[in-house]
Image (tube, grey):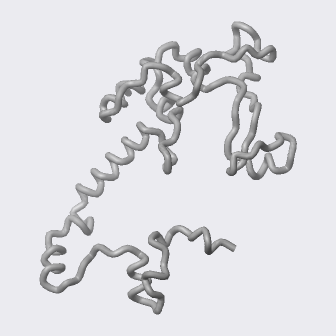
């Protein structure tokens, strides 16, 4: 199994040289915290304590409140992940590929870091391109469009408009998303 940086290079991504670059955090140093056992921070369970919790709107949530159970979407731990990775691995080149890719910050609009997104993208493209039944791989589609004027490039909004009395202009461009003005 290749290491994290080896796998990044295999997918055409630049290698990471620091643990901060892996996690996207500002520091890879242990905080000077009197609650941590000096010199043995990596073995101290309190290093994993949450020091701040936040809801989806970025508002701080009191850990002892009922909201902490239901609405927390992000937490800040006592120590940065980069510091813990550095203590365990010592060098970025020794980081396990799986650990490194799940430690990466998410690419905007996705639930994946850069490496995971590259892996999944390549895999799904290969599945699509290798599937002889994938609708865009059918050579007859272009002939059907040319001869009969039937175009296979339709989205769900187009299908809804064609099969109901709702004009396409009244439907959202992406019918899978609720318009903000439609929310109750």
Q: Residue at x 79, y 48 (%)?
A: 69
- Residue 26 in which image quadrant: top right
**Residue positioned most to the bottom:** 165
Q: Residue at x 44, y 81 (%)?
A: 169
Q: Give the side of residue 149 with respect to residue 20, left or right.
A: left
Q: Give the side of residue 19 with respect to residue 43, left or right.
A: left
Q: How many marks?
A: 0
Q: In the rendering, at what x and y percent does residue 175 appear?
A: 49, 73
Q: Give the side of residue 179 with respect to residue 94, left or right.
A: right
Residue nearest the observer in this picture, 175 or 6: 175
Q: In the rendering, at what x and y percent does residue 82 appear?
A: 57, 23
- Residue 135 in which image quadrant: bottom left
On the rendered image, what quadrant is the N terminus found in? top left
Q: In the rendering, at what x and y percent does residue 74 appear?
A: 67, 42
- Residue 11 in which image quadrant: top left
Residue nearest the observer in this picture, 8 or 14: 14
Q: In the rendering, at what x and y percent does residue 42 appear?
A: 66, 16
Q: Residue at x 24, y 66 (%)?
A: 136
Task: Please tell me whether residue 142 is drawn above or below residue 17 in the rendered image.
Answer: below
On the rendered image, what quadrant is the C terminus found in? bottom right
Task: Please tell me whether residue 122 is drawn above or below residue 131 in the rendered image.
Answer: above
Residue nearest the observer in this picture, 105 or 87: 105
């Amino acid at each position: 199994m290749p290491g994290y940086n080896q796998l990044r290079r295999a997918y055409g991504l630049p290698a990471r040289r620091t643990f901060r670059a892996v996690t996207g955090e500002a520091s890879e140093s242990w905080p000077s915290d009197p609650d941590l056992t000096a010199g043995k921070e990596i073995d101290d369970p309190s290093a994993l304590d949450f020091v701040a919790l936040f809801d989806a709107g970025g508002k701080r949530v009191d850990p002892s409140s009922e909201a902490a159970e239901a609405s927390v979407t992000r937490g800040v731990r006592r120590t940065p992940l980069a510091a813990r990775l550095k203590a365990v691995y010592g060098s970025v080149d020794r980081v396990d590929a799986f650990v490194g890719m799940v430690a990466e910050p998410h690419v905007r609009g996705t639930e994946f870091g850069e490496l995971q997104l590259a892996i999944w993208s390549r895999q799904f493209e290969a599945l699509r391109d290798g599937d002889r039944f994938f609708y865009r791989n059918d050579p007859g589609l272009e002939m059907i469009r040319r001869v009969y004027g039937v175009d296979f490039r339709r989205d769900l909004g187009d299908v809804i408009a064609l099969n109901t009395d709702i004009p396409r202009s009244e439907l959202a461009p992406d019918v899978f998303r609720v318009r903000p003005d439609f929310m109750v």
